[in-house]
């Protein structure tokens, strides 16, 4: 699974893939029985994320977010899933919601900066990343994102359309 600040391990064997698929099937049964179980939707999203099924992951995280609005981690995962599927407006909305819940979380401000960047809203991205660095000046991810945003603003880097574009070295 892809977990914040933890290196991702891919299901690189047939057995691992079967295990993830089985877990997803069990979670589907849970949400048929109880469609308001936000945690089951969230973990299902993590399962789909692990096997690179981005549309299904986004759908599951979206269902979780519809149900559970008080948890910033639910909004965070939905935001990333939206960015992976090109839904920048929804990503921005989820990131802004997460900040409303937890305004002093530097990572959430960095996430909003990322969403703004991919939406081409560079001035907003600069403002959001500045807030992130005010909260936690030592955060390496925010520092790197800040450099990338400045490169875009200065015309040294093209406008990215995906996270992968933004991660590319120039």
Image: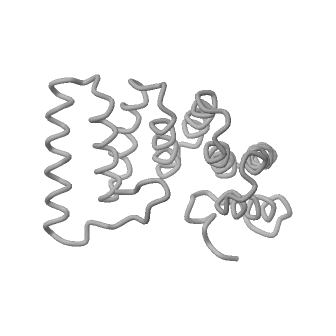
- Residue furthest toward the bottom? 170
Residue at (66% x, 33% y) in the render: 103
On screen, residue 25 versus residue 56, left or right, reads left
On screen, residue 126 versus residue 57, left or right, reads right
In this picture, is 50 found above or below 128? below
In this picture, is 14 found above or below 51? below
Residue 118: x percent and y percent?
Answer: 64, 51
Residue at (69% x, 57% y) in the render: 142
Q: Quadrant of the N terminus?
A: bottom left
Instruction: Say which quarter of the image contains residue 68.
Output: top left
Residue 56: x percent and y percent?
Answer: 32, 45
Residue 115: x percent and y percent?
Answer: 63, 46
Instruction: Say which quarter of the image contains residue 94.
Output: top right
On screen, residue 8 versus residue 31, left or right, reads right
Instruction: Say which quarter of the image contains residue 27.
Output: top left
Residue 131: x percent and y percent?
Answer: 77, 44
In this picture, is 17 found above or below 106? below
In this picture, is 152 found above or below 77? below
State how the image is colored.
Answer: one colour
On screen, residue 158 versus residue 46, left or right, reads right
Q: Quadrant of the C terminus?
A: bottom right
Q: How many numbered circles does the render carry?
A: 0
Residue at (36% x, 31% y) in the render: 63
Residue at (69% x, 47% y) in the render: 113
């Amino acid at each position: 699974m892809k977990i914040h600040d933890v290196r991702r391990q891919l299901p690189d064997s047939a057995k691992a893939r079967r295990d993830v698929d089985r877990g997803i099937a069990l979670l589907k049964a849970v949400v048929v029985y109880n469609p308001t179980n936000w945690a089951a939707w969230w973990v299902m999203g993590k399962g789909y994320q692990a096997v690179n099924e981005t549309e299904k992951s986004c759908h599951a995280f979206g269902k979780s977010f519809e149900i559970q609005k008080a948890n910033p981690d639910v909004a965070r995962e939905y935001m990333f899933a939206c960015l992976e599927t090109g839904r920048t407006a929804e990503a921005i909305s989820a990131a802004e919601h997460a900040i409303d819940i937890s305004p002093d979380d530097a990572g959430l401000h960095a996430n909003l900066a990322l969403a703004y960047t991919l939406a081409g809203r560079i001035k907003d991205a600069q403002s959001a990343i500045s807030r992130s660095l005010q909260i936690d000046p030592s955060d390496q991810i925010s520092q790197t994102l800040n450099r990338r945003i400045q490169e875009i603003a200065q015309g040294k880097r093209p406008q990215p359309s995906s996270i992968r574009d933004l991660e590319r070295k120039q």
